[in-house]
């Protein structure tokens, strides 16, 4: 999400009287790759680019090919195969041993539905998971679609223009499967006339939202690192008790009395870090009533156990499902000592939880790092 926002910002700053641009998007990955599907790079014809599609080995070649696509005003699909032991193959030195398809789409600034404009519309809306369909393979055109076309899927009605019940049903079913798994993948569909329509189906969830409930000095390194990652941060505290430096790294500051006004969804993590036992004990039942998927509490295990014990004695029952959302002590066991290291530990655990990972060392994995078809 941070990359998309950077691309939109750069796009809005382009001098359209002198500069043309294209969007490079990773639409298929087989095997290993530094970046995954959905990685993007905005390329200007003056040689400037924002974002990235690899660890740096493909960007130079993609820049040349993007400028060619701009000159032709035609989208193109480029395949980088790093599995071949060919010294002339771009990217082979990376050693990733994978195949990457990159779609290069020239951007028409006059077109309100060009890919960057569509991404911008997604960012401007209320937090939700967006589903984007991009044509990556199609001979000629079909019902107004052509290579490079991107559209938003908002339900079966949004693809009614295809005027093909069988195709619409198959596409809708595929989208539902991908959305349930949170997967972005390409998929080919047979057209009635024998041609093939290949789409990149992208599931684009909102950025992780971190709600920090506290005002002590350790809020600052956590907010700083969160901003660097590209997540959203809301601090719940008395504004008069917060350091002024927090204003530059926080999206919102909300008083405890206005906690209910915060938009909290399943992509939200809440950290209780007031350093006050009574305050955290008061806040825990309240935050468990929200849709937040992750609730963390600072402090040793004995402290959190005491909070849960006292709540139980007061008749406030924490269900098994609610207990599974509580992470106390918060963070991964990395031997963190300083506030900055503790922040790293906390954010690493949150990322692991939202990715359905354990947080163990990658060298201990017996399967590929990323899920493969």
Image (cartoon, rainbow, N blue to C red):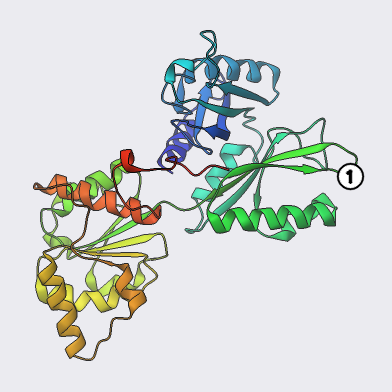
Residue furthest to the front in view is 366
Task: Name the residue at 18% across, 90% down.
Answer: 314
* Secondary structure state at the residue bearing disc 1: loop
150 left or right of 297 in image: right
Q: Is residue 347 visible?
A: yes
Q: Relative to residue 223, is residue 176 depicted above or below? A: below
**Quadrant of the drawing holding the N terminus:** top left
Q: Which residue is mark 1?
A: 192
Front residue of this view, candidates 89 and 169: 89
Residue extending furthest top?
88
**Left or right of residue 19: residue 294:** left
**Residue 85 placed where, x, y %?**
52, 14
The residue located at (49%, 25%) in the rendering is 97
Circle count: 1
The C terminus sits in image quarter:
top right
Q: Tell me where residue 310 appears, x and y as whole percent.
A: 15, 84
Between 156 and 144, the residue placed more toward the observer is 156
136 in relation to 15, above or below: below
In the rendered structure, the answer to whether residue 108 lies left or right of residue 32 reads: right
């Amino acid at each position: 999400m941070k990359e998309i926002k950077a691309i939109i910002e750069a796009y809005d700053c382009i001098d359209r009287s002198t500069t043309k641009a294209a969007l490079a998007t990773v639409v298929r990955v087989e095997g290993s790759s530094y970046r995954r599907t959905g990685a993007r790079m905005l390329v200007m014809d003056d040689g400037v680019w924002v974002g990235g599609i690899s660890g740096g080995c493909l960007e130079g070649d993609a820049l040349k090919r993007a400028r060619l696509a701009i000159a032709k005003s035609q989208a193109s699909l480029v395949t980088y195969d790093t599995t071949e032991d060919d010294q002339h193959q771009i990217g082979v030195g990376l050693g990733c041993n994978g195949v990457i398809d990159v779609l290069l789409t020239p951007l028409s600034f006059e077109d309100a539905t060009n890919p960057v404009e569509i991404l911008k519309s997604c960012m401007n809306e209320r937090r939700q998971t967006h589903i984007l369909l991009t044509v990556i393979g199609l001979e000629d055109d079909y019902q107004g679609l052509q290579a490079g076309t991107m559209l938003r899927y908002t339900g079966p009605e949004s693809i009614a223009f295809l005027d093909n019940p069988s195709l619409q049903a198959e596409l809708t079913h595929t989208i539902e499967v991908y959305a349930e798994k949170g997967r972005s993948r390409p998929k080919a569909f047979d057209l009635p006339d024998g041609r093939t329509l290949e789409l990149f189906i992208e599931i684009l969830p909102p950025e992780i939202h971190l709600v920090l409930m506290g005002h002590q000095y350790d809020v600052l390194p956590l907010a700083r690192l969160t901003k660097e990652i590209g997540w959203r941060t809301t601090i719940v505290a008395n504004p008069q008790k917060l350091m002024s430096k927090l204003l530059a790294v926080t999206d919102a500051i909300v008083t405890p009395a206005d906690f209910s006004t915060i938009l909290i969804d399943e992509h939200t993590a809440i950290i209780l870090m007031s350093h006050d036992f009574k305050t955290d004990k008061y806040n825990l039942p309240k935050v468990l009533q929200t849709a937040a998927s992750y609730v963390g509490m600072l402090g040793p295990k004995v402290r959190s156990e005491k909070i849960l014990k006292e709540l139980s004695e007061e008749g406030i029952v924490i269900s098994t499902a609610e207990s599974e959302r509580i992470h106390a002590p918060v963070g991964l066991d990395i031997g963190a000592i300083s506030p900055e290291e503790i922040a790293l530990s906390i954010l690493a655990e949150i990322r692991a939880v939202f990715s359905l990972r354990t947080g163990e060392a990658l060298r201990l994995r017996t399967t590929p790092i990323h899920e493969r078809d």
